[in-house]
Amino acid sequence: MDNVVLIFITLMASTVSIICIRYNIRLRNYLKVFIETSKQISNREFHSRLNIDARGELGELSKNFNDMIDIMNSKIEEVEYNHLQMTSILKSISHGILAVDIDGNIMLINDEAKRILKCDKYEFIEGKNINLIINESSLLKEIALFKGSKESKYVELTTDDEIVYS
């Protein structure tokens, strides 16, 4: 009788071990697919999707992940379209436009503003601080007065070399 119980326990332990090993292997394969797909998404390959036939929590996670990819791709396309529109508008305006954040970093500048500030037309200066771009101290002082302000004011400034900024 003791041998029968021992054999039964051994068979049950073996069965449970096999089930656990199979589950572990399957789970690791799912994780490999998740990792590979997330790498593709990180590389802006938004056509990538998780193709996992899992049920339960893994199936729900896979569905939610694919939904997030769709939403992220949609938002990125929207931002890129809005950026293209804004760039087109800026290029068509004949006045120089310069937008600066509260820290003095250039958020937006058009070609006319680059010409006025004597910058290279093809240089990418968005993100750079105005102190590195603008050489005219009186102009920098006027800009500093409005940092962080919501106030709008018209200022006309003539430099020593008779350049008029307004």
Image (spheres, rainbow, N blue to C red):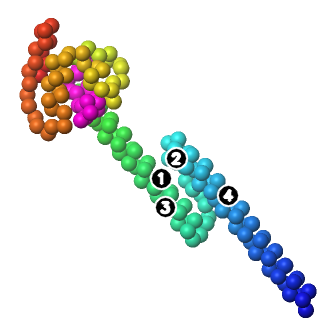
> Residue 71, position in %: x, y?
42, 53
* Neighbourhood count class around disc 3 (C-alpha, 10 Å): few under 14, some 14–19, many 20 upward: few
C-alpha span from label 2 to label 3: 14 Å
**What's the CA distance linking mark 1 and mark 2?**
8 Å
Between discs 4 and 1, the one toward the N terminus: 4
Q: In the shown orientation, is residue 129 left or right of residue 8?
A: left
Whether label 2 touches label 3, CB < 8 Å:
no
Identify residue for label 1.
Answer: 69
Q: Indicate which disc, 1 or 3, sits on the residue closer to the N terminus.
A: 3
**Disc 4 crowd, CA 10 A, few/some/many (<14, 14-19, 20+):** few
* Callout 1 touching callout 2 (CB < 8 Å): yes
Residue 64: assigned label: 3
The residue where tag 2 is placed is 41
Q: Quadrant of the C terminus?
A: top left
Numbered range of the magenta stretch: 96-115
For the residue pair 51 and 14, the one nearer the viewer reads as 14
Q: Indicate left or right for 90 with 9 as reference.
A: left
Residue 77, given in percent of the width and then of the height, sits at: 39, 44
CA–CA distance between discs 2 and 4?
Answer: 18 Å
Asked if the residue at tag 3 contacts the one at tag 4, i.e. Cβ–Cβ closer than 8 Å, the answer is: no
Which callout, 4 or 3, points at the residue further toward the start of the chain?
4
Q: Residues within 10 Å of mark 1 (few under 14, many from 20)?
A: many
Q: Residue at x 19, y 37 (%)?
A: 148
Q: Name the amino acid type tagged 4.
A: Asn
The amino acid beneath tag 3 is Asn
Where's residue 125, x and y in %?
A: 33, 24
Is the Cβ of the residue at disc 4 closer than 8 Å to that at disc 1?
no
Please state if 144 lies on the left or on the right of 46 as rendered: left
Residue 126 in magenta stretch: no
Q: Label 4, label 1: how many angstroms apart (C-alpha)?
A: 21 Å
Residue denoted by label 4: 29
User: Image quadrant of residue 157?
Assistant: top left
